[in-house]
Image: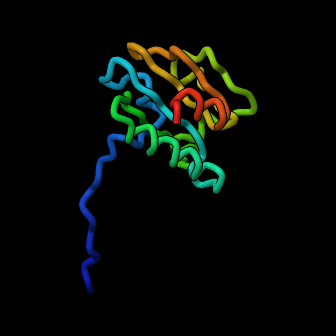
């Protein structure tokens, strides 16, 4: 018997599960929600990286909708007025600006996300 090597657990403070996006400790922050396994969403990862490289920026978190724990919010329509995880419905790449734990601005589509982040 050869005991398998176990890698140490790594906690990512930038990649989130959807259940935690309404209760971050930051007063203002962005959450980018998309299926990052799709090739066209490499662009979204790039936008997030460019935004983080700006001198002044808010925290930005990612929710990968290809993760089985996050699939429950994938729907046929978007719900821009969602104020809880149970109300969320995402059908294309989405960026949500949170202020005091509330959905303050809901941005849908890569071009609109790029404009919002000014990158």
Q: Is residue 21 above or below residue 100?
A: below
Residue at 54% across / 47% down in the picture?
A: 68
Residue at 40% across / 25% down in the picture?
A: 29
Tell me if 85 is positioned left or right of 9 in this view: right
Find residue 52 and report its horizontal and vertical position in percent: 39, 39
Tell me if 103 is positioned left or right of 13 in this view: right
Q: Is residue 113 above or below residue 99?
A: below
Image quadrant containing the N terminus: bottom left
- Tell which residue pokes out farthest to the bottom in this image: 1
Residue at 48% across / 31% down in the picture?
A: 31
Q: Is residue 1 above or below residue 64?
A: below
Residue at 61% across / 49% down in the picture?
A: 41
Find residue 14 and report its horizontal and vertical position in percent: 37, 41
Give residue 109's quadrant in the image.
Answer: top right
Find residue 46 and report its horizontal and vertical position in percent: 51, 48
The image's colouring method is rainbow
Find residue 25 and report its horizontal and vertical position in percent: 30, 23
Q: How many marks?
A: 0
The residue closer to the viewer here, 105 or 57, is: 57
Tell me if 35 is positioned left or right of 100 in this view: right
Tell me if 81 is positioned left or right of 18 in this view: right
């Amino acid at each position: 018997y050869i005991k398998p090597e176990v890698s140490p657990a790594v906690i990512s403070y930038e990649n989130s599960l959807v259940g935690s996006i309404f209760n971050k400790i930051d007063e203002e922050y962005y959450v980018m929600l998309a299926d990052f396994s799709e090739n066209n969403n490499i662009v979204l990862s790039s936008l997030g990286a460019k935004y983080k490289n700006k001198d002044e920026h808010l925290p930005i978190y990612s929710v990968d909708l290809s993760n089985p724990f996050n699939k429950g919010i994938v729907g046929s329509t978007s719900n821009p007025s969602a104020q809880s995880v149970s109300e969320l419905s995402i059908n294309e790449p989405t960026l949500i600006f949170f202020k005091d734990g509330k959905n303050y601005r809901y941005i849908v589509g890569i071009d609109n996300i790029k404009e919002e982040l000014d990158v």
